[in-house]
Image (tube, rainbow, N blue to C red):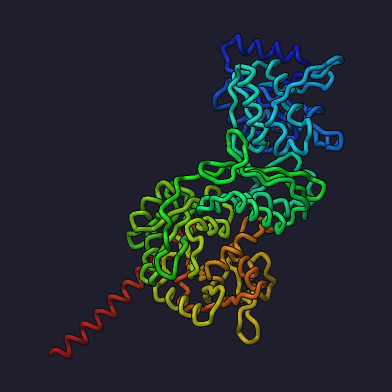
Amino acid sequence: MLRTIRTEEDARKAVARARKRGKRVGLVPTMGYLHDGHLALVREARKTCDYVVVSVFVNPRQFGPEEDFERYPRDLRRDKRLLAKEGCDLVFAPAAKDIYPRGFMTTVGVGGLRDIMCGRVREGHFDGVCLVVLKLINIIRPDVAFFGEKDYQQLVIIRRMVDDLSVGVDIVGVPTVRDKDGLALSSRNAYLDPEERRRATALFRSLELGRLLITGGERRAEEVRRRMVSALIEGGVDRIEYVAIVDPDTLEEVRHIRSDVRIAVAAWVGDTRLIDNVPVEVRARRRRRRVKGRTAAVIMAAGEGKRMKSGLPKVLHTMGGRPLVRWVVAAARQAGVGEIIAVTGHGGDMVRPVLERLGVETVVQDVQRGTGHAVLQAYPLLKGFSGDVLVLSGDVPLVRASTLRKLLSDHRRHSNAVTFATAVVPDATGYGRIVRARDGSFEEIVEEKDADAKTRRIKEINGGIYCFKAGTMFDALLMLTSGNAQMEYYLTDTLGIIRSRGGRVEAHLIDDYTEVLGVNTRKDLRTVAAVYARRRRDEDNKRGVANGVHRKRKR
Ligand code: AMP
């Protein structure tokens, strides 16, 4: 049963009783207005502690005089409801006069660390944080206290304080929880109107860019910073406070990136100040690879395939006795693609060995944020590549090498920025429809949900097979936003971006629609298997006829 306690004395008593019963106590300090990020801390606490205390206290000492203390969102009833569901044992929600009674004089501060990054602008903020955290720890006396990496500087400062003052509490950091489009959850997101909410993703997108640049071998922090600043501005933030590339333990600015770093940003969108950061692992620089040949392929193979109702990752289901993704790799190879990169995710541990045996390089999309985000993960391996990139799906197994070759040759002959395959299908339900101009040239793709009745009658659909100029593709991917109901980054949106920047986009109609059939369900799997069997029979017949003719002639 969840209990709510207001005073220090009651809190001490409740925790003492739990401790008497031999319980390991965990503390999660918060300012309330809880979201899934806070709840992740509670879940983490549940894993290792059997008595979990969550404090809810909007700490006046960590707000500057011009800051949002007054308007900071508060809703204790809602918070308690959420915490009860997570199996929290005690909510400690003290009043300010109990935490800071009359005559309170003490200050705590971690010099140096408090004056950089957020501390440059939020004077006194981290001293206020340290003070309240130390006080809460002294009241609750937990074995472990949990903090989010979302506030990375805070986490580092608290670790330092706890070490320096021998507080005797383990500090556990919990990775940042994000919305689908990558925006880090924060109580302050409640301030954003829908238009600002869209622009707010610029922080995450700039961090992604920074991470990909570093993973791709960029070692000059200043260059990474410069690119991130541009991305933040293009992404629509109103003011940048800082972009920092720092040592993850000391928060010292790094100039030349040699080992793991943390990249952090603070920026304003409207009247809201937002912060975010990500870790970047830096492996010893791999031998500088040259991409083989003038065509590369990126195969999307990260899908979970929930509707397959199976523990096997979707692309490992088989058609004609082979995993779906192997057919796609084979078609790409036969079409003359030198370098194949697969984006893995769900079931990656099972998918990667299969692909690596085929000589396919793999990258990881750790969270699914749409097709555009998936392809972007190949950036570190294709950085500087100036050829063409085929984008294929690991669950579209019937595509033929001859079709890819034709797509590529049209793409080059017409000097297109993008050429993508379309097909006329008997049933277009669920597909993006192709709208063409009077002269037959491609106009736009209209997704089904946005299509009016007339557009829905169109039977020519987007086949999801693309050929891009590499540089143009990545430039457009980095500009993608996620202004759709699913909050995902869609590859198809690059076509509009590329066209608006003067690139030629061509829709290439293929003859046999079965080549673009994708597998999402068991039924789809049976359909592609039947098409495959029919193709085999037709080929056998053709061969048979050829042999028959041959024999006849012989006679
Ligand atoms: P706050 O209520 O903002 O003071 O946050 C309370 C705790 O939750 C802090 O340790 C934060 O770092 C953590 N936190 C806030 N947002 C997130 C998030 N999106 N993911 C993980 N932890 C978070």
Q: Using residue 522 as the reference point, say whether residue 64 is left or right of it.
A: right
**Residue most toward the left?**
555
The answer to whether residue 73 is seen in the rendering is yes
Quadrant containing the C terminus in the rendered view: bottom left
Quadrant containing the N terminus in the rendered view: top right
- Spot occupied by residue 17 in the image (x, y as percentages of width and height): 65, 10
Q: How many marks?
A: 0
Task: Name the residue rendered at 17%, 90% in the picture.
Answer: 553
268 up-or-down from 30: above or below: below
- Spot occupied by residue 524 in the image (x, y as percentages of width and height): 46, 62
Task: Name the residue rendered at 80%, 33% in the picture.
Answer: 74
257 up-or-down from 96: above or below: below
Task: Name the residue rendered at 56%, 12% in the picture.
Answer: 22
Q: Quadrant of ligand 1?
A: top right
Task: Name the residue rendered at 63%, 87% in the picture.
Answer: 439
The answer to whether residue 307 is seen in the rendering is no
Q: Using residue 522 as the reference point, say whether residue 15 is left or right of it.
A: right
Q: Nearest the camera: 251 or 271?
A: 251
- Spot occupied by residue 517 in the image (x, y as percentages of width and height): 47, 67
- Spot occupied by residue 18 in the image (x, y as percentages of width and height): 63, 13
Q: Nearest the camera: 114 or 430?
A: 114
Kindly indicate the quadrant of the structure image that contains residue 173.
Answer: top right
**Residue most toward the top?**
20
